Amino acid sequence: MSEKAGKVTMEKLVSLCQRRGFVFPSSDIYGGLSGCWDYGPAGIELKRNVKEAWWRSIVQERDDVVGIDSSILMNPKVWEASGHVAGFSDPLVECKNCHLRWRADQLTENKCPACGGELTEPRQFNLMFKTFIGPVEEAAATVYLRPETAQGIFVNFMNIVNTSRKRLPFGVAQIGKSFRNEITTGNFIFRSREFEQMEMEFFVKPGTDGQWLDYWVQERFNWYVKLGIKKDNLRRREHGQEELAHYARGCFDIEYLFPMGWSELEGIANRCDFDLKQHMTHSGKSLEYYDDETKEHYLPYIIEPSAGVDRSVLAILCDAYDEETVNDELRVVFHFHPDLAPVKVAVLPLSRKENLASLAKEVYGVLRPCFATQYDDTQAIGRRYRRQDELGTPYCVTIDFASLEDNMATIRERDSMNQIRVPIPALKDTLLAKLAGEDLFILPEGGKIWKQE
Ligand code: GAP
């Protein structure tokens, strides 16, 4: 029997993520680098699965969105036109006593949160990282690491109209790294200085922007629910007028109830024609769209769903985390949606004995081309189940001595811990069906229910 134990905290999550190879501090052996993280073997699989799920739903399954991969370094004029050089800044204050720096707009009191010291007057601090292009470190060679992927889409608008034959409304999607020299980072991978975004710019005819904004807010909310995030932990929040970015006419955040409270997971903004207008003015190139139906030239409006990969990963980790007491022992488990689980199937021979190992390796060889599969023959079987639970592996396949006689294997399900016994030749198709959502107790021919905990 299992029963609920404790709930997720950021401390538990950080420690489990490190122990099971999801996320490590960057440059760990040198003491880390503030606001930077490395994804380990389990984390990178989870992150790739999140990005693939996004790409599938935004690009692959739609006729009206195409993809792009633009460069991180861009002509610095892009950032003048976009408003980032002049305005992408946060108010910074410094403690006169301990010299720690803080974002003035995030402080509740006018004193240093670390030592109570007096703070300097706020000054605007630009969040873009600067570097130099070419061998000479001079002002004329200054370039920026992009603080959002969106601008790479806006400046390619005409290239895409001219080559993809897409007509309005249509979107352009991009996944990639962005960099912000955040004054304060924190809450694990929630706010970092190097992170990944999944952004889509949806170009629409002016006048239809309101309905498309509503559409994308709904679509994006449903995407998180489809990936298994509990609806109760998600909400939409409309920005007040005073909160809107300079380019936005309307904006909704999708928020998640993280351990530190409700926080932004994704923003969906109506950017009007701000970006195309700015780039048209600054580049001197026309970015007007010719509408064949109405025979008009105009600048499309843009609806932008902009999500953070790392924040999605963090929300998925928080939501999937669970502690249960099973037979008086603590079981920690990630109940990931099967599409997101870093490892789908683990093959576990009951012992390392030669005849058992060779059958288990054979099974492993059949399964691994179909799904992310792990082979584990260390420690007692119970310990191995717990390890797979902590990785969130939906199914374990156990090969035991009876398998040598009856050519059957046990499938153990992560969430219920129930087990069925299945003929080895039927394993692959059975697992495919289970991973696609079929009930564990629907059996292939010759299968039987083994253990119901
Ligand atoms: N193009 C619009 C844009 O970049 P944003 O609200 O600044 O809008 C969009 O960022 C998303 O990117 C956020 O909702 C968040 O998920 C992610 N993001 C932004 N800054 C981040 C940071 N410092 N660390 C991690 N993710 C971040």
Image: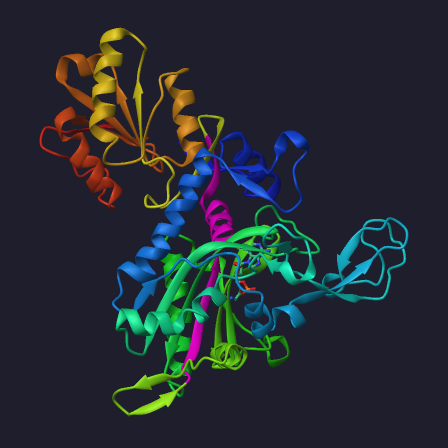
Looking at the picture, tell me which residue is in the foreground, 256 or 363. 363
Question: Relative to 207, is 111 on the left or the right?
Answer: right
Position of residue 320 measured from the top left corner of the image (x, y, whole percent) = 44, 45
Residue in the image at 62% along x and 33% along y: 28
Looking at the picture, tell me which residue is in the foreground, 288 or 60. 288
What's the image's color scheme? Answer: rainbow
| Magenta span includes 323 | yes
Residue in the image at 46% along x and 39% along y: 43
Position of residue 432 measured from the top left corner of the image (x, y, whole percent) = 21, 39
Q: Can you tell which quarter of the image residue 91 is in? A: bottom right
Q: Can you tell which quarter of the image residue 59 is in? A: bottom left
Residue in the image at 26% along x and 61% along y: 61
Asked if 152 appears above or below 338 in the picture, the reply is: below
Question: Relative to 169, is 44 on the left or the right?
Answer: right
Residue furthest front in the image? 136
State the count of labels: 0
Image quadrant where one finds the C terminus: top left
Position of residue 275 measured from the top left corner of the image (x, y, whole percent) = 50, 76
Asked if 355 appears above or below 384 in the picture, the reply is: above
Position of residue 272 measured from the top left corner of the image (x, y, whole percent) = 48, 81
Residue furthest top in the image? 354
Asked if 313 appears above or below 19 in the picture, the reply is: below
Which of the four quarters of the rendered structure image does ligand 1 lie in? bottom right
Image quadrant where one finds the N terminus: top left
Residue furthest left in the image? 445
Q: Which residues are magenta?
A: 299-325
| Magenta span includes 202 | no
